[in-house]
Amino acid sequence: MLLSMFLLLGTNMLMAQDAATGTVATDSDKSAMWLGVGYYALLLLVAAVSLVILGKILRVYDLSQKIQGKKGINWNNIMGFVCIIFLIAGIYGATWSLTVQGSMSLPESASAHGVDTDNMFTVTSILTLIVFFLTQSLLFGFAFFYRGSDKRKAHYLPHNNTIEKIWTIIPAAVLTVLVVFGFFTWQKIENSTEVKGDINIDVTGHQFAWELRYPGKDGKLGALDYKLTTGDNKLGIDFKDPRSLDDLQADTLVIPVNKSIRLNIHAQDVIHSVYMPHFRLQQNAVPGLPTFFKFIPTITTAEMRVRTDNPKFEYLLYCNKICGGSHYNMQKVVRVVTAEEYQDWIAKQKPYLTDKLRTELKLAADKSTSAPQAATNRLALNN
Amino acid sequence: MSTLAVHDHGIVHHEEGHEHHHKQTFLNTYVFSQDHKMIAKQFLITGITMAFIGMCLSLLFRIQLAYPDKAFPLLETLLGRFAPGGRLSPDFYMSLVTIHGTIMVFFVLTAGLSGTFANLLIPLQIGARDMASPFVNMLSYWFFLMASLVMVSSFLVQKGPASGGWTIYPPLSALPKAMPGSGEGMTLWLISMVLFIASSLMGGINYISTILNMRTKGMDLWKMPLTIWALFLTAVLGVLAFPVLVAGVVLLIFDRSFGTSFYLSDIVLNGQVQPFEGGSPILFQHLFWFLGHPEVYIIIMPAMGLSSEILAVNSRKPIFGYHAMVYSLIGISVLSFIVWGHHMFVTGMNPFLGGVFMITTLIIAVPSAVKTFNWLATLWRGNIRFTPGMLFAIGMVSFFISGGLTGIFLGNAALDINLHDTYFVVAHFHLVMGSAAIFGMLAGVYHWFPKMFRRMMDERLGYLHFWITFIGAYLVFFPMHFMGLDGVPRRYYAFTEFESMKHWLTVNVFITWAAIMSGVAQVVFIANFIYSIFFGKKATQNPWNANTLEWTTPVEHLHGNWPGEIPTVYRWPYDYSKPGHEEDFIPQTVPYSQTMSSNSVHDFEDNPAGLEEYTKWAVANKVNEQVK
Ligand code: HEM
Ligand SMILES: [Cu+2]
Ligand SMILES: [Cu+2]
């Protein structure tokens, strides 16, 4: 007990010191810095010395008890009690963490399949939490109740086949249920075969940004060939493919609510990962291996702002596979809008085939039958 | 051959009063030693040093995470170009997490843990004079040391150490231009890892052959302590899995240096079209995780073995369900080779394959659960003696539960979609692997310290060390689950760029201070460790009243372990508190003929051969008694 009090005190002191040195450090003065270092070194020294003194005091106390014919400090008992205190404090702490920090996690799923994910998550959480609290209680409970003494002898129990069978079969059964559930949910979620009416959108990752490509009027994305990549044709779009000619670029991933969206995911340099946690969606972007993820957004950004009570709320797409120095800042805003808003927005997007590119590639102007939006002012979409 | 060599060094010479042909010099006793006990100590001390380095690296990046906007002039003084203006550079941050992970996973928890305890305990607990090949064993240490030095030296190269994460996925690690750490730093990483694997294989082959061939009389497989079972299966896993990593690493070296395209295809780097064609980055991940998943069990199984032993000794009870414990270890070992795909659910691997890996992954949770329940049952109605070793073993079980349960979320592919590469994974593996295995290792250090250094460690400092570290580790890793559930990715230099992640900043500060607190507790451990080596209380021969063979060796170390004949083993190692016996332990070397009052048919329930022997013995014994 004394020890833990000492500890607490120590940590508090450290914290206080930190605040002090923090302000010192900002003047970036060398001597101030070394003063700070010295401070900590001194603190550590003081802690070490007090620890030694404490140890000596305990030893003296222990000896004096023994001289008086008493037992001396029974560390075994003390540790048993610390175990039970830890158990109680731990249950309290875990519960606190689960409720307070647990409520800081993601809001409800904004995609159709995410509802299944969340249900699975809830079921798994309930099961595992029961096991968690039960086993930890048994562990530290036993440690406390069966703390040793010279008077007792342990119960010789090498095994018990019945109970061992029970606790093999029960976890196996529970896990079977989870596996079967999970397997079918997974198969359903991962089904990304294209059906008519899917909106295909290309998401391409490179160090350190995402590029978006929407199909034009024809509703189809043109072919890509990485060897065609140049400064102006940064995705390597193959404009010999007529479907490419009307492909659109965009700055924000705008998607219509309740429509099936199929992301075609590419990477140019290293592996990235398209992570859109609000939609319970993640898929790696792998160079040389296009991947897909199909989902249906169900809650518009506007509605989510109301639900989360946060007027600035935005859905985000960010990179979740280590990809270099600026991995930590590779994000794109995702905006879920109504069908009409989506139509308005897409009509304002510019095609990839800019006039500059057109002359570069020596494509005749009259071939561009399907790029009527080319003239549209780009300013409008920089909202 | 090797057995002969061992006998050469064995009893004969010692009985003749140390008159070796080669003299005991400082060099061959402490440096180029071929004695397994000395090699164990070399592994331990190198391992602890690496752990300390790894811990300091983690504290550096924890400071960055807690105070992303603050400048610490001290950092610039210490780290120079890696921390311009007193703030870690993003690239160096990546290097820190990469080298921290590599050091902890491979150098501390693989070599430091297996290397120490396999070397110390295998010969001592099975009753052998040394390893099958002491020379190869020595080489194993020296390769490990070289690997460690190369790894640490990568901090000295201009662009800094490898920085693509401990999993070094190409193309990031294959393209020197993709990030500074993928230059010479990565080259050094790969060299170090090849040396490391060589070390690990030499060690593993030795452990396996020693256990299979050099057990003393009576030590059949079902009389081996669980430590030996665990170390044996660990070595098997290592020997089967590490060569695959070599293959992966060699192909990566080819891609980096000789222009091949095993892992590379369709790459445009910084606007430049690269010539690579036809490779697959996913191939590397398959090779890596084919090792990588067994690797995590290579880490945890020795910790499980050590903890099982320590829990039994200090509960003064037999380990509950010895056979189930062995079978679950075997089950885990086999299954661990067919689950690697659970690290790759969202890589674009065929979803059906993902589904299969999900099934195998969740099956592996069953033997893990069995082990946990058996540990709990071992404590039940015990007479528990809280040595620091025991506390750390209990802590190991606690962490294994907490971290293992989150494995059930991650192993479920549907849930992993949103959890992969977030802090939820960081929490999972730091609890189940990091904390649990480190606690198993520390338990082993406290428990076998008297065997290694002939002195005891200070118990009260051990208690202090345990409680601060135990509480600290939970404070550090528990909140990370919720960051993961909020979609906070791992390996992010700062969370300041995201409005949605800013509410975790205070939690990050808290975690960092908890980490610093735990770090300070390790100073207590190091002080206790060093002090006790020189000034600790002198150990008795069997300080814990344990049954296993290592405690029958004299306190003074001999090359060859036992002064006379190697003792014969008559019983399993877990006869603690056996009814009918005066003391609460019966060492393995005590024949049943000396423990008449405590013998029972029940001892042989799962062992028909033993039962037969026992009945024979019983008949013979009756005859004996009649003769008397
Ligand atoms: C109860 C059984 C376990 C299950 C079902 C399980 C499942 C998983 C899964 C599915 C992942 C991948 C998560 C992701 O990256 O999205 C994972 C990661 C990991 N697990 Fe486990 N695990 C279990 C036990 C263990 C044990 C015993 C250890 C080590 C001793 C361990 C160490 C790791 C490590 C190191 C990683 C992270 C690797 C990385 O990405 O850096 N796990 N686990
Ligand atoms: Cu990225
Ligand atoms: Cu794994």
Image (cartoon, grey):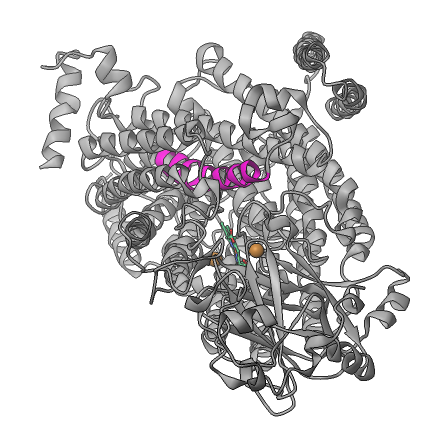
Up/down of A302 relative to A196, above or below: above
Q: Residue at x 64, y 53 (%)?
A: B489
**Which quadrant of the figure has residue B268?**
bottom left
Q: Position of residue B325 (x, y in %)?
A: 44, 54
Q: Is residue B109 magenta?
A: yes
Q: Is residue A190 magenta?
A: no
Side of B193 where A144 appears, left or right: right
**Which quadrant of the figure has residue A343?**
bottom right
Task: Compare residues A45 and B302 and report the one nearer the observer.
Answer: A45
Up/down of B17 relative to B400, above or below: above
The stretch in magenta equals B90-116
Task: Compare residues A323 and B573 and report the one nearer the observer.
Answer: A323
Up/down of B190 relative to A108, above or below: above
Q: Position of residue B253 (x, y in %)?
A: 30, 48
The N terminus of chain B lies in quadrant:
top left
Up/down of A26 relative to B566, above or below: above
Q: Residue furthest bottom?
A: A196
Side of A284 where B154 appears, left or right: left
Q: Position of residue A335 (x, y in %)?
A: 76, 69
Q: Residue at x 69, y 68 (%)?
A: A121
Q: Residue at x 66, y 21 (%)?
A: B73
The C terminus of chain B lies in quadrant:
top left
Task: Compare residues B356 and B159 and report the one nearer the observer.
Answer: B159
